[in-house]
Amino acid sequence: MILDKVASTKTTYEDDKTSESPIRSIAKAISWRVIGTLDTLIVSYILTGELVLATSIASVDFVTKMILYFFHERIWNKIKWGK
C-alpha cells in the first residue's frame, strides 16, 4: 500500500530538496491560493450579496488553505509513487 511505503521510507532533507525545494512549495501554495481566493470571494459575494462578509470568508479561506496546501505538497513530495 502507498501509505505503508510513505511511513516506512525515511528521506533526508538533501533527498527532499533535490525533488522540490520548500520555497517552491510555498510559491506554488501562494499562487494557487490567490486563484482559489478570488473564486471564493466571487462565490461568497454572489451568495451573500455583502462584500465585507465575502472578503472575510475569502481571507480565512486564503490562510487556512494555503497552510494545508503547503503540507499537502510536502507530504506528496516524499511519496516516490509516480515519479
Image: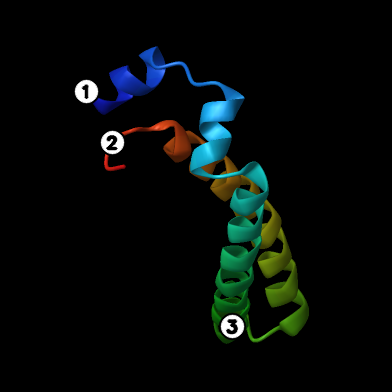
Q: Badge 2 local density, few (<14 within 10 Å), some, or many (20+)?
A: few
x and y percent of residue 6 in the render?
Answer: 37, 23
Structural distance between the alpha carbons of marks 2 and 1: 11 Å
Q: Against 55, is 72 above or below? A: above
Q: Residue under circle 3?
A: 42
Q: Against 40, is 80 above or below? A: above
Nearer to me, 61 or 17 = 17
Structural distance between the alpha carbons of marks 3 and 1: 40 Å
Q: Residue under circle 2?
A: 81
The residue lying at 68 percent from left, 75 percent from top is 54
Q: Amino acid at mark 3?
A: Ile
The residue lying at 59 percent from left, 46 percent from top is 70
Do residues under tags 2 and 1 come within 8 Å of each other at their CB atoms?
no
Do residues under tags 3 and 1 come within 8 Å of each other at their CB atoms?
no
x and y percent of residue 43 in the render?
Answer: 54, 79
Give the residue at the far right of this rendering.
52
